[in-house]
Amino acid sequence: PWADPAVRDAGFVSYLQRLWFDTHVHSVQALHTLAEIAGTERLVYGTNFAGWDAEAPGTDLRVPGVDLAVNAQRLLRLPARTNRPADR
């Protein structure tokens, strides 16, 4: 009863799917949970990617099968690059 009618009618998830999420989290489990709840099409590297508070060296915080560069291009409305170096 206290929720805005737009949220009640469209549902919280429809609003959640409009947001973009930074993949800079502090564990592999947190990253997988974020991908599961928010979806992978709205995940991008944040401004502190591999920064001072990054996960321990050797921890792989990539989302399997997701090209975050493509997501960033969509977020920034950049044209798609056709000759992109392979993901390392």
Image (cartoon, rainbow, N blue to C red):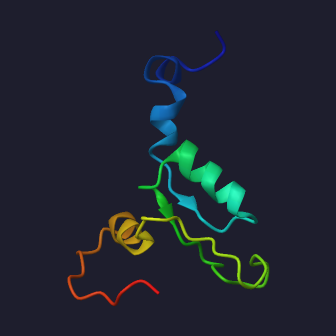
Q: Is residue 83 left or right of residue 75?
A: left
| Residue 75 percent across, percent down from the top left | 39, 64
Given the current orientation, which residue lies at the most extreme top position? 1
Q: Is residue 78 left or right of residue 44?
A: left
Q: Quadrant of the N terminus?
A: top right
Q: Is residue 17 above or below residue 3?
A: below
Q: Is residue 22 left or right of residue 59?
A: left
Residue toward you, 18 or 27: 27
| Residue 14 percent across, percent down from the top left | 45, 33
In this rendering, the count of numbered labels is: 0
- Residue at image point 76% right, 66% down: 26
Residue toward you, 70 or 36: 36
Which of the 4 image quadrants contains residue 56? bottom right
Q: Is residue 61 above or below residue 84?
A: above
Q: Is residue 30 above or below residue 15?
A: below
Residue toward you, 54 or 72: 54
| Residue 68 percent across, percent down from the top left | 44, 70
Which of the 4 image quadrants contains residue 61? bottom right
Given the current orientation, which residue lies at the most extreme left position? 82
Residue toward you, 60 or 25: 60
- Residue at image point 78% right, 85% down: 52
- Residue at image point 41% right, 83% down: 87
Q: Is residue 42 left or right of residue 23?
A: left
